[in-house]
Image (tube, grey):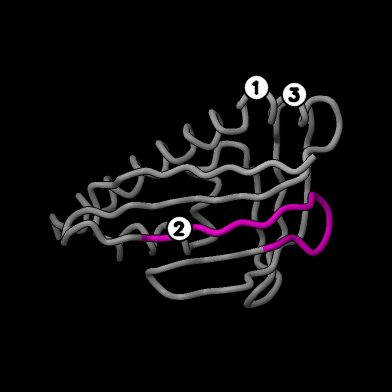
Amino acid sequence: MSSSLVETVDVEAPVAVSWALWSDVAEWPKFLSHVKDVVRIDNRSFSWKLALPGADKSFIAEITELIPQERIAWKTTEGVEHAGVVTFHRLDDKRSRVTLQIEYNPQGFVEQLGALTNLDSTLTNYDLGEFKTAAESAAGNASRV
């Protein structure tokens, strides 16, 4: 069974701020609640450690497309199988829209239950809310400089 997530958040921050936050690997655990660690292997590959309900997971992902201030796409090369893309859209000079799309294959009972009950969607929305807070804070700090 394959599952898809598509979630969007509007952020009171310019695209440049949203992009800068998301494109900085060191920031991911601050707004992605299930991400415990991300380590850059090289310019295109990252090692991820996740703590998900019912299981800890790890995987290696590689960037498959990178268009600054527009999109970042990735796919896994080892471990948990999934692929995704995050896109950044300019709404106006001070606002942006961030859309996250993930395709994955839930493994085991807990992951299949999460997909069926939309728990994965709820977790993704929570994380996008955390991202929104972090980006808006960064935009506020940048405007005070």
In the picture, which quadrant includes the N terminus? top right
Camera-side residue of 123 and 1: 1
Span colored in magenta? 75-88
Query: In the orientation shown, which residue stands out farthest toward the left?
Result: 144
Which of disc 2 and disc 1 is earlier in sequence?
Answer: 2
Q: Residue 144 at x, y = what percent?
A: 13, 55
**Label 2 packing within 10 angstroms: few (<14), some (14-19), many (20+):** some
- Three-letter amino acid code of the residue under disc 3: Leu
Q: Is residue 5 above or below residue 65?
A: above
Q: Residue 10 at x, y = what percent?
A: 30, 45
Residue carrying label 2: 22
Marks 1 and 2, how far apart at CA: 27 Å
Is label 1 in contact with label 2 (beta carbons under 8 Å)?
no
- Residue 117's label in the rendered image is 1
Element type where label 2 sits in the image: helix
Residue carrying label 3: 113
Q: Nearer the viewer, mark 3 or mark 2?
A: 3
Is label 1 in contact with label 3 (beta carbons under 8 Å)?
yes
**Label 1 packing within 10 angstroms: few (<14), some (14-19), many (20+):** few
Q: Determine which quarter of the picture holds residue 2.
A: top right
**Label 3 packing within 10 angstroms: few (<14), some (14-19), many (20+):** some
Q: Residue 72 at x, y = what percent?
A: 52, 66
Which residue lies at the image location 56% right of the left edge and 36% below the top edge?
33
Which residue lies at the image location 57% right of the left edge and 74% below the top edge?
65
Q: Is residue 51 above or below residue 144?
A: above
- Residue 4's label in the rendered image is none
